[in-house]
Structure formats: structure tokens, C-alpha cells
Image: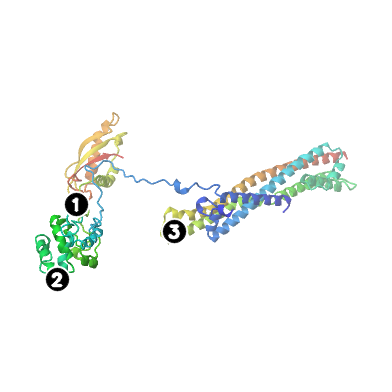
Amino acid sequence: MEAFVNTDAATLSPLGLFMQADWVVKAVMLGLLAASIWTWALIVSFRAKISRARNAIDRFEGEYRRADDVDAFHRTHAESDLAIARVFTAGVAEWRRSTAGKVIDRDGTRERLATAMGAAVAAEIDRMSDRLNVLATVGSVAPFVGLFGTVWGIMRSFSAIAQAQNSSLAVVAPGIAEALFATAIGLFAAIPAVIAYNRFSHGINRIEARLMRFADGFHATLSRQLELG
Amino acid sequence: MDRAEKLGLAAALIGHAVLFGLLSVGFLATPDPQALQPTPIEVSLVEEVGLEAQAPASIEPPAPSIAPETGPPEDAAPPAPEAAPPEPAPEPEPAPPAPAPEPAPAARPAPKARPRPERPKPAERPPEKKAAERPAPKAPPKAAPKRDTPPAKKAPPKAAAAKGSGNDSASTKARPRGSRLGDDFLKGLSDTPSESKAVTPPSAARVDARALAGIRDAIRRQIQPCADKQVNPGPGANAIVTVLNLRLNRDGTLAGNPRQVRQTGVTGENERYAQRVTDLGIAAFRACSPLKLPAEYYSTANGGWSNINYNWQLR
């Protein structure tokens, strides 16, 4: 395997470009490589998380619509860790607490139900969008970090040119290729991060909207129940 | 870090490792970057060729201080003395065969070997008989040459005269190689390379295409400030190319008004500006007139800038 790994700059071998670099540029490259790996890890996990949440919402809403008894339905889903189930549980718990007393303050109960379920939705979204900030940070900072590595590498190769007293392209090119590699890694990390950030924040917004719609619907049901009861 | 993130991290690590491996084995490598480099071709644009082509300056090296080896005479010479010893017995025999020209060299060194300083050189032609007669009793060991001399009479002796290495004593002592001449061959010559092949100085030069183009460029450059001030008389006027004949003094001033030789690019649209363009050109030359041009090309065997045609065009 070793024999096939080229280490000269002309073949664009990442190992070769890395080994020729200054230690500052090496640090930049390693950091950007870590950022890229972390970005992709988050992309994979977010994708899984969001699609799971969406499917769960679909299933839960279907079951909820078909359910006759809210209490029985609640009993089957009380221990679920799905986001929508938690919102539902928060609403039911608030309803029970508010209607436990003799006198029922209907307006107050309505308000509390809305607040409780809104808070549950916010908490779920909060939990879900944790680490989305990492994608945003990588997307906006990685190009600059890569640019820093490139500027540093080009400065270094220019000073090497000055020492060598030779400005032929063969002397200049490897240093510049190696320096530009830092920007390449920066962009390689940043582009997926930006795309993923936009895509996942859109997905999370949609999930939030669906949770809010479900909470509003459930709130309407409970509020109707209040007037009857 | 929950399960999804662990899964994602593993996937990301595997993906990066695969990409790294692909790049390392030259997946995106430029195919032989050396082969992609275009071979540069030097191009020089010359508007008009010179009146006479001039060869580039000669860069021939000076003549070498040692004459070139013309052949392997040295190898041929030694056999002579060897052939000589057997000769004494059959006296007239060896004369006709091939060695005839070779024994001749013996003629010159032979006198040197002898203790007689009186006539070392002239022994070549007439005294050969004498040399053959006289040394006979005097020099017993080196008797070989004297018997060679009779055949030398028949053979042309002048061909061999230059090579002086026939004799045993002479060849072992100096052992010269090829046609190298004596150490005093260069006496009186300096070590500096001869300047006989130096470039002829430009003052006597003929103007060549490059020089002519350079002169035209120099004129263009120098009248540019004045040309820029000229107002374009109308549309299409800058398509007119006027050939102006300049007669210049040695100091670069105009010897007379530039004269229009011919005009090209005149169409029905711009013909009314033709005269105006010529006048503008003349005015430009008058305004910027002391032109600084290379003095050596003022007047040469095939022309110069004393009388030169210039293509005037408005920009």
C-alpha cells in the first residue's frame, strides 16, 4: 500500500501536501480536517434525527386522530420519548392539574395549556437543534481558517523564494499548491456545513411548525372540552 | 453524544478515510503536468522587412592555438626505423615498396643526431647525396638513415619533410603527437583570442529588419505625444494609413516637410479627411521634430533613417 501513496505535490496527494507544509499550516489543516469530520458526523446524525422525528409525528398524528379516548391514548404514550408525545403529555398534564380543583378557571386554564404546550414544543426544538450551531460555525469560519493557512503558507514560500533567489515556476509552484491546500480543506469543510445548516434549520423549522399545529389542535380540543365540562 | 451522532461520526470517519485514500493514489492527479506545458515559441513582429537581410552576428570561437591533428602519422612513423635495419643488406631492394615516402622523414632528424651543426636544415634537398656519402664513415650506429636516402631521391621528399619523427633518437626523446607543432610555434602571438571574427561595428553596419522596426517604433514613440493632441477630423479617419517620407538631419531635425508618398484605407466615407490626415501627420512631426534615433543607423550602405518612410495613422 505504501508504494502506491504518492507524496509529491504534483499528484495532489493530500499526504504529500500535508507533509511539505509549515507547522502552522499543518495545524490549520488538522483543525479543518477535524471540523470536516465533525461536520459530516453531524450531517449524518441530523439527517437521521430529523427524518425519525418527522416519521414519528406522522405516525402519532394518525394514531391521535383515530383515538377515541384521550386518556387511554395518553396512557399508551406517556413513556414515549418522541417530541410530539412529550408535547401531548405536557398538555394532558396541564389539563389534569388545572381541572383537578373544584372551581375551574376556564380562561386561565386555556392560557396555561397554551403556555405549557408551547414551552414543551420550544424545549423539543431546542433539544433537536442542539449542535446546529456547530454547522453554522464551521460553515462561516472554516474558509477563513483555510485562508489563514494559505496566506501563511504563501508568505513562507515567498520568503523561501527570496532566499533561493529563483522565481521560476517550478520553485514557486509546490509551496503555493501546498498553501492553497489549506483553503481547499477549509472550503471542503465549509460548503457541506453551510448546505447542511440551511437544510436542517429548514427541516427543524418545519418540525416546529408541525408541533405547534398539533399543539394548537390539541389546545382547541381541550378548550372545547372545558366549555362542555 | 447519542447513538445517531456516534453513527454519524463513524460514517464521517470512513468517508474521509476513503477520500484520503483515493486522493493519495492519484485519483484527481493532473496527468503528467510536465507534458501539459506548452513549448514557448518566440515571435517578433516586424512590420516591414529590411531592405537587405542581415545574418546574425557570428559567434565563431577564435582559432585554436594548436593545429588540428590531420591524421595518425605518428603511428606510421615508428615502423620506419624498424624497416630500416633490415635494409642495409639488400641495398637497392627496399626502394620500390610502399615505405618509400616514410623513410624520408629520417632525412631531417638525421642531421640533428649528427654532431654537425653546420647544415641542419638545408640537408633536405640537394645535400642528400652528400649526406649519404659523408656520414657513412663517421656515424656507425645511426647508419640506417644514410641508406634510406637513396630511395628518398626517387620518392617525393617534400611530402615527408614536415613530419620530423622518423629517427629512433628523435622519436623517443620528444615523442610528439599528431601534427602538434613545436613549443615555439606560437612565439609572438598573444593568448588573447583573435579578434579577426569580431562583429563588425554597427557604424559600418547595414540596417537590418530588426533595426528598421526599432527605428520605426522609436519614431512612433517620440511623435506619440504630438499625435495624441491631433483632433480626429471625423469618422473613419483613423482607418487611413498615410506613408510619409521623412528626410532627417543627423541631429534628428526635419530636413524638410514630410512628404506624402501614398495613402491606403481611403474609402468613400472618409476620403474627404484624407488630406487632413496627411496634414495632421506633418504637423505632428513638425511639433515633435528633433527625433532621437540611433546615430549609427543614420545612413548605411542599404539605407537608414536619413530618408525613411513612416506609416502615419491617427489613433
The 10 Å Cα crowd at callout 3, few under 14, some 14 to 19, many 20 or more, is: some
Q: How many marks?
A: 3
Closer to the camera, A115 or A202? Answer: A202
| Residue B115: assigned label | 2
| Residue A161: assigned label | 3
Residue named by callout 1: B203
Q: Nearer the viewer, mark 2 or mark 1?
A: 2
Kindly identify the amino acid type of the residue bearing the numbered disc 1.
Answer: Ser
Across and down, in percent, residue A39 comes to 64, 51
| Residue A49: assigned label | none
To which quarter of the image does residue A33 belong?
A: bottom right
Closer to the camera, A186 or B80? Answer: B80
Closer to the camera, B245 or B55? Answer: B55
Q: Chain of mark 1?
A: B
Residue at the far top: name it: B268
Give the image's coloring scheme: rainbow
Across and down, in percent, residue B139 comes to 15, 69
User: Does B237 sit above or below residue A24?
Assistant: above
Q: Give SS at disc 1.
A: helix
Q: Chain of mark 2?
A: B
The 10 Å Cα crowd at callout 2, few under 14, some 14 to 19, many 20 or more, is: few
Q: Residue at x 66, y 48 (%)?
A: A43
Closer to the camera, B228 or B255? Answer: B255
Kindly identify the amino acid type of the residue bearing the numbered disc 3.
Answer: Ile
To which quarter of the image does residue B95 belong?
A: bottom left
Across and down, in percent, residue B227 comes to 28, 43
Label 1 to label 3: alpha-carbon separation: 43 Å
Label 2 to label 3: alpha-carbon separation: 74 Å
Kindly identify the amino acid type of the residue bearing the numbered disc 2.
Answer: Pro
Work out whether mark 2 precedes mark 1 in sequence or the reverse, and give the earlier one: 2
